[in-house]
Image (cartoon, coloured by chain):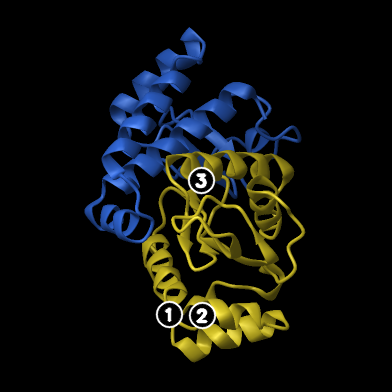
Chain colours: A yellow, B blue
Amino acid sequence: MELKEFFTQDAIQLDLKGESKDEILKELIGLLAVDEKSQGILFKMLKRRENLGSTGIGKGIAIPHCRSLVVNRLRVAFGRKRGGVDFKAIDDQPVHNFFLIVAPPLEVSNQYLPVLGKIAQFAKEADVAARLEQLDDPKAFLALLDEKGV
Amino acid sequence: MHPHLETLLEIQDLKAQRRDLADAVEREVQETVFNLSVDEALAELDTKITEMEETLPPLVLNRYRRVSARHPRVVVPVIRGTCYGCFTSVPTALASDAERNAEVRSCQNCGRFLYLID
């Protein structure tokens, strides 16, 4: 299983506009191209997870994630916000890079946790935060995943 | 979407989140990667689930309790006309309802609440 298999280029946004945690979450959900009602439900679920504790894992990276019946397969998106936003991350630093993961409550292939783990592993690599800042286009993001062998 | 169906859907999603957190592997990921206090999170989710259940009207709540006593998943998707709880076909009129999910409906075979999804 390789992470790049899960990302489509239209679910990669290197210039997020949001200025707050909520705006960023909504923008990320928008990348999944689900209907408006489903977007609202996903937002509520992601907020509930964030309320339990921020998914900002430090080094400018956050991995908001949830399960919801409004998707019928695992969906992922990546967004970058120049300058970052306050995401209440564990290191109290602004977050610039966001990996969104949404999965249905039950998946036959059970990919949710492995994908979450791989993204966390990728995000923790020493040079990844800086490399993400330098990306020019979605293809470069996919190439970086490839290069890191995740 | 019918507000009660939306509530049922949220309860189901919260229960899925709870189930994940209670899993040993996920617990480890949440504790090590996200620094989450899983036991506190579980207690918080339990409180929220109970609060949301209490907002359901008696008729829906009774059905919800009956179904949840038999099945771990109370709301299931209908995909291409099939109930994904018991995998039987649902009536065409329901599966192709123009006002999707505007009513709270159940599978005639297994009794689970139905959520129409593309």
Query: Residue drawn 37% across and 31% down?
Result: B44
Callout 1 and callout 3 share a chain:
yes
CA separation in Å, label 2 and label 3: 29 Å
**In the image, residue B85 above or below residue A94:** above
Q: Which residue is mark 1?
A: A125
Residue B105, visible in the rendered structure:
no
Query: Residue drawn 26% across and 50% down?
Result: B23
Q: Residue furthest left?
A: B24
Please rate how many residues cluster around mark 3, counting C-alpha atoms within 10 Å: few if below 14, some from 14 to 19, many from 20.
many
Q: How many marks?
A: 3
Q: Which mark is residue A128?
A: 2
Query: Residue drawn 72% across and 83% down?
Result: A136
Indicate the chain on which mark 3 is placed.
A
Front of the two marks 1 and 3: 1
User: Residue B110: x and y, percent?
Assistant: 40, 31
Q: Which residue is mark 3?
A: A68
